[in-house]
Image: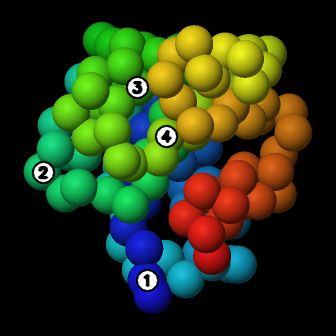
Amino acid sequence: MQKHILIADDNTIVRDMVWAALTAILDINDYQEAANGREAITRAEQTRPDLIILDVHMPEMDGIAAAHHLKQSMPETPIILFTMYELGQDSAKRFGVDAVVSKEEGLSKLSNEVQSLLSL
């Protein structure tokens, strides 16, 4: 079954790298992009993705605020914070997200979390 992903990061290169890594190993046929948290909320509410990946530090609205809003409006949708900051899984629970992956851990770790949350 094909999945739809929303990737929100203010860096276009990061969004492209995440998309390339995920499609190389997962059955994902569509993704939406957002450059900030506010845009992520708008796109998520329009497209209802199967999973959302958010950077923490973005302009206009950060990923933590966006995650909080999205979990209230779409509680069933898994959210991953993909960030340069060391937040840990305890922070994930505190922020209402399903997982936190450090960008230092890499795209392989992110792909594993996506697989796990989508049960692929």
Q: Which residue is mark 1?
A: 2
Upstream in sequence: badge 2 or badge 1: 1
Amino acid bearing label 1 = Gln
Say few, some or many: other residues with alpha carbon within 10 Å of mark 2 (under 14 / 14 to 19 / 20 or more): few
Q: Which residue is mark 4?
A: 79
Disc 1 secondary structure class:
loop
Amino acid bearing label 4 = Ile
Q: Which residue is mark 3?
A: 67
Residue 76, can we see it?
A: yes
**Quarter assignment of residue 32:** bottom left
Left or right, 68 with respect to 102, comes to left
Left or right, 83 with respect to 45, comes to right
Q: Position of residue 63 (x, y in %)?
A: 45, 21
Against 21, residue 107 (above or below) is above
Q: Position of residue 44 (x, y in %)?
A: 24, 45
Question: CB under 8 Å between callouts 3 and 4?
Answer: yes
Amino acid bearing label 2 = Gln
Say few, some or many: other residues with alpha carbon within 10 Å of mark 1 (under 14 / 14 to 19 / 20 or more): few
